[in-house]
Image (cartoon, rainbow, N blue to C red):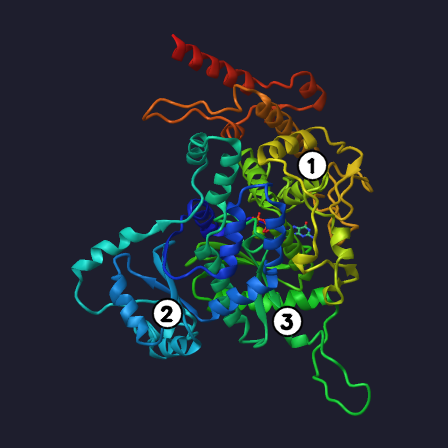
């Protein structure tokens, strides 16, 4: 669904170039340190250490609970770009100790401030004033999104504070290609790409804070509700700038797990009935969508997309720069998120490979932010997981195996679908596989360049190709709703482009001209090589039939690339 009206175009382009510049203080949470260590560790060398570390991993729910609690003690403050940091902190500290704060830029300068306890936050909010201008035209909704005002004279020391902002965002693809070309191995290129692209600690906090601000709006109707992020904001595969998928959870109210007395009297609430669960979801989202639209500070371009398979409210949260999708009654997606998070935690190679493949796919327009016949990031991630299950020995277990390891507390059936899998990371034993990221990347392309898409379906539940139950060009079994195909939208053209690019990339990674560092003249941009070459524009997108491609595996692009490399070498020798 496209954003409409003039805001749509402005926001879409602004979001594309939105750069969050953040600077932070305070200690990283223990868990994120763990995740970070996990990402930095040498790959495939110390299986025992990996197992030990896995046992200490926090579940997604643990991470979410911690982040939510932090968010509830936090405020988001719009401030002047020359705000004096010291003065600002001194002012805020009068209300209570501050655990952590950071600044970022998105349509102006903002600060996220986390108090050590709720008293500090309450005191600050009590002191905050209602805007004095056009008082009558303001919706009197007091949120935790505030503006810093200064009645004093300009402060000369203010001039410096803006300089401390650190950019914390994806860099443009050209810059990434240059950066990767300076690395010394493909392994390093892959890990470098992950570090550049992955969500930062601050960005993750901001995502939870936006959910918490939204919850304050929804709580006007449903005080016991929660709003949780799901999808790439929390599954470990999020890239800076990715959308913020949110799930309005009313289970706390509906008391799904509440115990009924076996005998005697009891009271129950009278509640209005709707025609179906879907109708309830639609009316909840409709009402909350209206509240967000009319009362939500900073929420603009609200669209209610209630007839979609999964009804949602889409809007832009201007102060954070996030494109937001709010859903309700979407517990299967929450389970998929938990599963992807678990796979990402099992072995650092999973995240590195997913980031690399997602970035490669985006660079070639295989994925898109606009809905259509493209392969989605979710489908692509499942394809990477399936490939890793098919290694010998496998790098990650099948979903059926994770279900077999589940304990009684892990049992989960949602709308008749078995969503059970183990939550205790320590129970998962992995065979020793020490394949390098370079090898895996090359094999990934080879695997899908020759995959029998015409006959076979991809299933991470079984970890084996299955016969295709329907005639869709690409069939990827939905891990939990197993009769569904998550890539139903993909057409033959898009699948062909994907296969052609896999063939080309596999070929490029095997050529000594392109798979070794090229060096470069001092002061000049380094010559792209390895992963950087794979991210450069391709010519294969225009190829129509697969037969033609097989006869001509080397595209014009590769030929010209190799020609230019030869010319450069000859030039250097002469
Ligand atoms: P990006 O937003 O592209 O970075 O990735 P994402 O993983 O967040 O994907 P998206 O926003 O499209 O979807 C959010 C989440 O919804 C995914 O992570 C999945 O958990 C779930 N999801 C998306 N598409 C499907 C689908 O076709 N089937 C199922 N079962 N879940 C899906
Ligand atoms: Mg998403």
Q: Which residue is mark 1?
A: 491
Q: Nearer the viewer, mark 3 or mark 1?
A: 3
Q: Camera-side residue: 499 or 30?
A: 30
Q: Secondary structure at mark 1?
A: loop
Whichever of labels 3 and 1 marks the residue nearer the N terminus, that label is 3
In the rendered view, does 518 fall on the left or right side of 383? left
- Identify the image quadrant of the C terminus: top left
Mark 2 and ligand 2: say if the CB distance to the nearest ligand atom is below 8 Å. no
**Mark 3 surroundings within 10 Å by alpha-carbon count, few (fewer than 14), some (14 through 19), many (20 or more):** some
Q: Which mark is residue 98?
A: 2
> Is residue 133 something one can see in this rendering?
no
Q: Secondary structure at mark 3?
A: loop
**Mark 1 surroundings within 10 Å by alpha-carbon count, few (fewer than 14), some (14 through 19), many (20 or more):** some
Q: Camera-side residue: 506 or 289?
A: 506
Which of the 4 image quadrants contains residue 310?
bottom right
Q: Nearer the viewer, mark 1 or mark 2?
A: 2
Mark 3 and ligand 1: say if the CB distance to the nearest ligand atom is below 8 Å. no
**Residue closest to the far bottom:** 265
Question: Distance from label 3 to label 1 (Cα)?
Answer: 37 Å
Question: Distance from label 1 to label 2 (Cα)?
Answer: 52 Å
Q: Which mark is residue 250?
A: 3
> Is residue 134 something one can see in this rendering?
yes
Name the residue at 75% across, 41% down: 458
The percent coordinates of residue 222 (x first, y second) are: 58, 75
Whichever of labels 1 and 2 marks the residue nearer the N terminus, that label is 2
């Amino acid at each position: 669904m496209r954003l409409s009206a003039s805001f749509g175009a402005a926001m879409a382009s602004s979001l594309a170039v939105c750069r969050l510049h953040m600077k932070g203080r305070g200690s990283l949470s223990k868990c994120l340190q763990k995740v970070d260590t996990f990402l930095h560790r040498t790959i495939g060398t110390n299986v025992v250490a990996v197992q030990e570390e896995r046992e200490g991993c926090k579940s997604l729910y643990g991470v979410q609970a911690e982040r939510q609690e932090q968010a509830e003690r936090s405020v988001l403050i719009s401030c002047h770009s020359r705000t004096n940091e010291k003065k600002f902190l001194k002012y805020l500290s009068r209300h209570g100790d501050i655990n952590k704060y950071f600044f970022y830029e998105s349509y102006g300068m903002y600060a996220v401030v986390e108090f050590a306890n709720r008293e500090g936050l309450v005191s600050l909010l009590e002191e905050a004033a209602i805007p004095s201008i056009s008082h009558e035209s303001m919706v009197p909704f007091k949120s935790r999104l505030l503006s810093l005002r200064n009645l004093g004279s300009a402060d000369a020391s203010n001039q410096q504070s803006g300089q401390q902002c650190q950019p914390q965002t994806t860099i443009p693809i050209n810059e990434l290609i240059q950066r990767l070309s300076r690395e010394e191995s493909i392994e390093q290129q892959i890990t470098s790409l992950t570090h550049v692209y992955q969500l930062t600690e601050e960005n993750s906090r901001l995502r939870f804070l936006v959910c918490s601000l939204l919850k304050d709006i929804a709580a006007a109707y449903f005080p016991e509700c929660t709003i949780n992020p799901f999808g790439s904001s929390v599954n470990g595969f999020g890239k800076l700038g990715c959308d913020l998928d949110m799930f309005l959870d009313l289970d706390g109210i509906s008391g799904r797990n509440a115990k009924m007395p076996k005998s005697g009297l009891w009271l129950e609430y009278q509640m209005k009935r709707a025609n179906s669960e879907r109708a309830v979801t639609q009316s909840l989202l409709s009402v909350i969508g209206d509240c967000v639209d009319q009362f939500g500070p900073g929420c603009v371009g609200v669209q209610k997309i209630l007839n979609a398979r999964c009804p949602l409210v889409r809007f832009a949260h201007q102060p954070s720069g996030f494109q937001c999708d709010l859903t309700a009654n979407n517990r299967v997606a929450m389970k998929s998120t938990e599963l992807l998070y678990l796979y990402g935690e099992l072995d650092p190679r999973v995240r590195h490979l997913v980031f690399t493949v997602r970035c490669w796919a985006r660079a070639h327009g295989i994925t898109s932010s606009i809905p259509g016949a493209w392969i989605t990031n979710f489908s692509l991630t499942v394809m990477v997981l399936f490939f890793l299950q098919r290694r010998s020995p496998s790098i990650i277990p099948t979903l059926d195996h994770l279900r077999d390891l589940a304990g009684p507390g892990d049992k989960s059936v949602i709308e008749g679908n078995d969503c059970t899998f183990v939550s205790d990371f320590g129970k998962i034993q992995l065979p020793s596989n020490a394949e390098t990221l370079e090898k895996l990347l090359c094999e990934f392309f080879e695997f899908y360049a020759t995959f029998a898409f015409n006959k076979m379906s991809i299933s991470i539940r079984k970890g084996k190709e299955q016969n295709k139950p329907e005639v869709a060009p690409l069939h990827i079994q939905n891990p939990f709703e197993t009769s569904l195909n998550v890539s139903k939208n993909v057409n033959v053209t898009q699948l062909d482009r994907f296969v052609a690019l896999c063939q080309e990339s596999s070929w490029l990674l095997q050529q000594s001209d392109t798979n070794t560092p090229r060096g470069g003249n001092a002061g000049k941009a380094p010559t792209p090589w390895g992963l950087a070459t794979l991210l450069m524009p391709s010519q294969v997108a225009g190829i129509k039939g697969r037969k033609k491609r097989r006869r001509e595996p080397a595209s014009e692009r590769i030929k010209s690339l190799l020609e230019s490399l030869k010319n450069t070498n000859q030039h250097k020798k002469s």
